[in-house]
Image (cartoon, grey):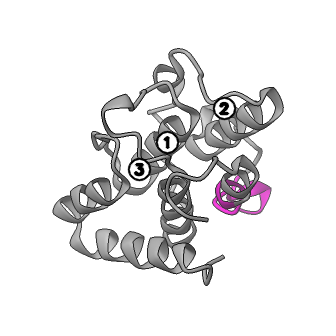
Amino acid sequence: MQIGEPIDMHFVKHAVADCCCSVTHCESCAGRQCLIGFAKLIAEYATTKKTLSIPNGMTMAPLRDTKTYDIDNVIMALAAINLSCKNCMDNHDDNCAVNILRYSLEVALLGQHIDFGGNPLSYILAIAKIDAETGDKVLRDYNLLKQGLGA
C-alpha cells in the first residue's frame, strides 16, 4: 500500500483490532467507552457503510478511558492508519474515519491529541517532538508497512 491509494479499511480495521485488550485483560468489554473499542466501532462503521465521513466523530471519542494498552500494537496500528491516509494536505477533514481512528490511538498511546495537518510524515515528526522513542517506532513501523514488511 502506498500513500494516496484508496483507503483499505479492512487493513486498518485489522490493525486496530490487534490493539484490543479483550476480556483477557478487561473484566468485560467496555465497547465505545474504551478508546480501542471506539476505534473498532469507527472502523466497522466506515467499512460497512463504505463511507469515510463521520460527522462529529472526534467528539464521540471516550477521552476518559485510562486503560493501558500494548504499546507496540498501538504503534503498529497508528503506523497502519497513517499509511492509509490519502495525504490530503489542505483537504484534510477532521470528520474522516481515518482521522478519528488516528485521534483515538494517539490519545491511547500518548494521552493527548496531536494536530494532523494532512501529511502523515509531518504528523509522525510531531509525535517525535512529544516522545522521540515513540516517534521513532511509529516511523519504523510506517516504513516497514510501506515496504510491505509489517504486520
Q: Which residue is drawn at 49% across and 49% down?
A: 105
Is there a contact, CB below 8 Å, between mark 1 and mark 3? yes
The label number, if any, that marks residue 32 in the structure image: 2
Alpha carbons under labels 1 and 3: distance apart = 6 Å
Q: Disc 2 on helix, strand or loop? A: helix
Q: Disc 3 on helix, strand or loop? A: helix
Q: Which residue is drawn at 56% across and 41% down?
A: 35
| Residue 128 position within the rendered picture, expressed as x and y whole percent measured from the top left | 23, 65
Alpha carbons under labels 2 and 1: distance apart = 11 Å
Residue assigned mark 3: 106
**Circle nearer the viewer, 2 or 1:** 1
Residue 44 lies in quadrant:
top right
Is there a contact, CB below 8 Å, between mark 2 and mark 1? no
Q: Is residue 13 above or below residue 97?
A: below
Q: Which amino acid does label 2 sit on?
A: Arg
Residue assigned mark 1: 104
| Residue 54 position within the rendered picture, expressed as x and y whole percent measured from the top left | 59, 21
Q: What residue type is labelled 1?
A: Ser
Alpha carbons under labels 2 and 3: distance apart = 16 Å
Is-magenta flag for residue 2?
no
Q: Which amino acid does label 3 sit on?
A: Glu
* Residue 48 as seen in the image, left or right of residue 26: right
